[in-house]
Image (cartoon, grey):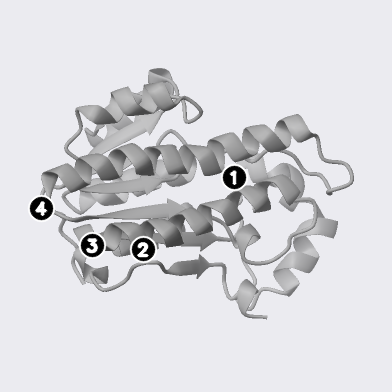
Amino acid sequence: MKIDFEGKTVLVTGAAGGIGGEIVRQLVAANASVVAAGRERAGLDAIVAETGCRAVEFDLTSEEEIAEAIADLDLWGVVNCGGFGGEIATPMETNIDVFDKVMAINARGTLLVTKYASRTMIRLGQGGSIVNVSSQASLVALANHISYGSSKAAVDNITRVSALELGQYNIRVNSVHPTVVMTEMSEFYWGRPEIGGPFLEQMPLGRWATQAEVAAPVVFLLSDAASMISGAHLPIDGGYTCR
C-alpha cells in the first residue's frame, strides 16, 4: 500500500525527538508538507536539514505561543508527539510539582494544539486527521508510572471527545499506544535486568519497539487509507496489553 499525502500540510510536535523525527521522515517520504514543531529551533535544525521540512517553535505549556504559531498554518493534519516522561515514582512517592508538569505538557499541551489546529482545519473546510501519541501506560497499570500514565489516560479522553466533536467536519482523531522504545532516555530504567526482563517475558513478541515501528502506524492512521477510522486507540506493544 502506497500512501501519498499529495502535499497536504501536517504539523508534528516533538519533532526533535527520536519518535517525532522518524514520523517527520516517513511523512516527508509520503509526500506530506511537514511542519516540525519543538520548543527551541536549535533542536529542530537536524531534522530540517535532513528532510527539508519547515519548523516552528512553541512551548507546549504556553497557550499564547501555540495560538500564535498555528494561526498562520493551513493545516490538514496533526501529530501530537511532544511529551515529557516525568519521574519514576509510585503514588506514595510522587512529586506533585512533577505530576503537574507532566500533565501540563502531555495532556494540556495536546489539548491546546488540538484546540487551535482544529479551528484552522474547520476554517479550511477540507477535513483532516489528528493522531495523538499516547502510551501503553494509559491502557494498563505500569509500576512507577503514576504521572506519565495519568497524563496519557487524559490524552486518550481528549482523543475520544475530539473524535466525537470533530467528526461533523470530516476530521478524524485517533491515538497510538507504543510500548517502550529503547532510547538513551529509556535505558536508565527499562534497561535494568530486573525491570526490563520480566516485562519482556510478558510481551508475546518479546522485544522493544523501534522508532520506525511506531511511526508507520501513525502515518497510516493519518492517511486516507484509514478514512473510516476515528476514535480508535491502537496499541503498538508487541501484544503486551492483550494479556
Nearer the viewer's eye, disc 2 or disc 1? 2
Q: Residues within 10 Å of mark 4 (few under 14, many from 20)?
A: few
Mark closer to the chain start, 4 or 2: 4
* Depicted 180 relative to depicted 34: above or below: below
Picture coordinates of residue 136 (x, y %)?
A: 60, 62
Mark closer to the chain start, 2 or 1: 2
Q: Nearer the viewer, residue 51 or 233?
A: 233
Q: Are marks 4 and 1 in contact (CB under 8 Å)?
A: no
Q: Residue at x 32, y 44 (%)?
A: 24
Mark closer to the chain start, 3 or 4: 4
Q: Are marks 4 and 2 in contact (CB under 8 Å)?
A: no
Q: CA distance from mark 4 to mark 1?
A: 32 Å
Picture coordinates of residue 169 (x, y %)?
A: 20, 58
Q: Residue at x 61, y 48 (%)?
A: 151
Amino acid type, mark 4: Glu
Amino acid type, mark 3: Gln
Residue 220 placement, left or right of 30: right
Nearer the viewer's eye, disc 3 or disc 4? 3
Residue underneath mark 1: 183
Numbered label attached to residue 164: 2
Q: Residue at x 74, y 51 (%)?
A: 145
Numbered label attached to residue 6: 4
